[in-house]
Image (spheres, rainbow, N blue to C red):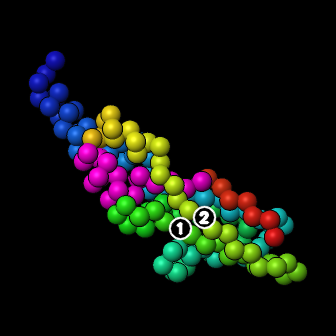
Amino acid sequence: MNKKLIAIALSTLITTGCSSIVSKSDYAVAISSAPEGASFVVTNKSGQTVESGVTPSTVTLSSSAGYFDGEIYTISLKKEGFDDKAFTLKSTVDGWYFGNILIGGLIGMLIVDPMTGAMYNLPPRVDIAL
């Protein structure tokens, strides 16, 4: 086998993170409520509004708030005739992040995945009863 090809493959594995290869840092999250038709506002942990709309809806959210910092969102819902409701959505560590032990090494574990945000994930959907 070509030594140059092997060297390129090894350098790629060494300089990338496992989650960065397999996962992503932005997730489509479906927001639904019972009953439907509730207005919602999504704010990040800094208090900034990042999305808004009416349920059911799908929004794109970042799983990371920065280097080694998972994002936490508050989803506030309002619908006439119902009490307002707030739901906390927290990112969690992606299982692929631990693949760095075998594939990405320390560079993937300590630099690449934390910087890209790929070390965290979000659920595909949130169902909130009013």
Q: Is residue 7 above or below residue 29?
A: above
Give the side of residue 83 with respect to residue 114, left or right.
Answer: right
- Mark 1: amino acid: Ile
**Residue at position x 39%, y 58% in the image:** 117
Q: Nearer the viewer, residue 54 or 91?
A: 91
For disc 1, the marked residue is 72
The magenta segment:
106-123
Q: Secondary structure at mark 1?
A: strand
For disc 2, the marked residue is 89
Q: Is residue 15 above or below residue 26?
A: above
Query: Is residue 16 visible to the viewer in this orientation of the structure?
Result: no
Which image quarter is the N terminus in? top left
- First reached walking from the N terminus: tag 1 or tag 2: 1
Residue 83: mark: none
Query: Is residue 92 visible to the viewer in this orientation of the structure?
Result: yes
Q: Secondary structure at mark 2?
A: strand
Circles 1, 2 touching at the beta carbon (< 8 Å): yes
Q: Residue 24, position in %: x, y?
A: 44, 51
Which image quarter is the C terminus in? bottom right
- Mark 2: amino acid: Leu
Q: Is 16 inside the magenta-drawn segment?
A: no
